[in-house]
Amino acid sequence: MNTSREPGVIVVGGGIGGLSAAVALSRSGLRVRVLERAGQFGEVGAGIQIAPNCTRILHEYGLLDEAKQLGVLPQNMIMRDALDARELTRLDLRDLERRYGFPYMVIHRSDLHGIFLRACQRAGVELLTDQLVVGYENTGTGARVRLADGRAEEAALVIAADGLHSTARQQLVGDTPVSSAYVAYRGAVPIDQVRHNGIAETDVVVYIGPRCHFVQYPLRGGEMFNQVAVFESAKARAGLEDWGTPDELDAAFEGTCGNVRQGIPLMWRDRWWRMFDRDPISTWVHGRIALLGDAAHPPLQYMAQGAVMAIEDGWVLAQHVSRLKTATAEGAGWDAALAAYQAVRPEHCRRVVLTARTWGQLWHLDGTRRLQRNAILRARDTYDYTFTDWIYRPTALTPDQEPAPYRSIPLDSVEPEPEPRHGHTVALPLDMF
């Protein structure tokens, strides 16, 4: 592509966050250049969940129909106890769409990435690979990035969307990722391979258990089936370097119900993902350098909002850029737009990151506290949206639009529900799915 003209925006990082931000800003009439360190654009992993606060933005970008063709709109999200398989609570996702106006979707991560990549290409975004950015600095009129080959590139705004191990985050903040000591294994397989296991082909199902959980849902129009096994590593807690290995995977799920145990042998065993986040920070904007996505707020996965927050970041920034356009060469009131972005996004994402930590703790309880948690979840009405309104409503553009967080319920406020009788701890019969 022709890179002779200086872009208005440089985006460092060509993942979902970086590409979605490029789409958003190009829609505002800006020249955007994306610098990706890898030799080609792509995503690794398997399934991803995107809630109404994200599909709303896809709709605005004109990308929702394409996403629907590639993904699945599940009917329910069901939470079960991983030891006895009993249902604890559920969301009716068709009613959820009626409430929030947009659907809950599951889609392959690479498919969502491809949607944004093609949108960037249609918009004329400059997409450059093999671009390793090693430093950032502000200039009198914008910001500059330094590359490993000695070159420098400048723009009115530089967005650092370079992920959990962000170079910009290290330079500007200097903190380090926080290990949860949990590890994830994934395994997306043709759905015909698992139909005999009694899977739920139209739902997202999460089995939560002591120090582990297991997630299942369909992908790619129901042709594939995604499974994720997450557990706490005893080796990590002991400070060992070699942690999260397949022997730990098998040991972690030994005591779970048959539905879960049937899925464990299908996990990919040649790779696994150690789960890290970072402590929230209140400052994302440093002059004309702005953090975005996992560079700003990497979460643990329990809220299924990591990629969603990144997409929201770009949408919010672009909304303020559009609103504050001036007659300057690039047509944007950068400092005011960045101040508006800074005013609203860090607080929202702080809540999500910290809630994800708490939610993960809740999922993995054992003993009496597990039974108290189960009692609370089973008492919830399917159509009570107290715990989702703060996250699935339209993305806030200003602090006053940010809804109040949900009301917490202390575990000790309820009596633990009794354990099921022996004989009810096996996998549920197929016709109950």
Image (spheres, rainbow, N blue to C red):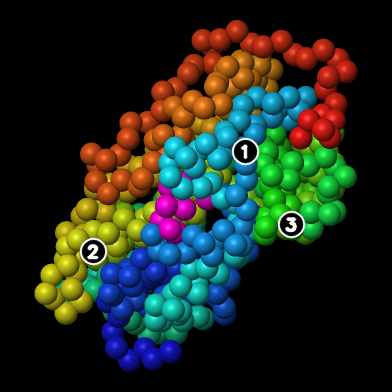
* Rendered view: 221 above or below 367: below
Which numbered disc, 1 or 2, marks the residue closer to the eye?
1
Q: CA distance from mark 3 to mark 2?
A: 40 Å
Q: Position of residue 135 (x, y in %)?
A: 37, 71
Q: Label 1 amino acid?
A: Asn
- Residue 55 colored magenta? yes
Q: Residues within 10 Å of mark 1 (few under 14, many from 20)?
A: some
* Rendered view: 2 above or below 22: below
Using the rendered image of the protein, determine whether residue 282 is visible from the camera's viewpoint.
no
Q: Position of residue 104 (x, y in %)?
A: 53, 46
Q: Position of residue 161 (x, y in %)?
A: 42, 63
Q: CA distance from mark 1 to mark 2?
A: 37 Å
Q: Label 2 amino acid?
A: Val
Q: How many marks?
A: 3
Q: Which disc, if any, is residue 321?
A: 2
Q: Residues within 10 Å of mark 2 (few under 14, many from 20)?
A: many
Residue carrying label 1? 76
User: In the rendered structure, which segment of residues is drawn in magenta?
Assistant: 50-59
* First in sequence: mark 3 vs mark 2: 3
Using the rendered image of the protein, determine whether residue 92 is visible from the camera's viewpoint.
yes
Report the side of 182 relative to 398 (left or right).
right
* First in sequence: mark 1 vs mark 2: 1
Q: Secondary structure at mark 2?
A: helix
Residue carrying label 3? 224
Q: Secondary structure at mark 1?
A: strand
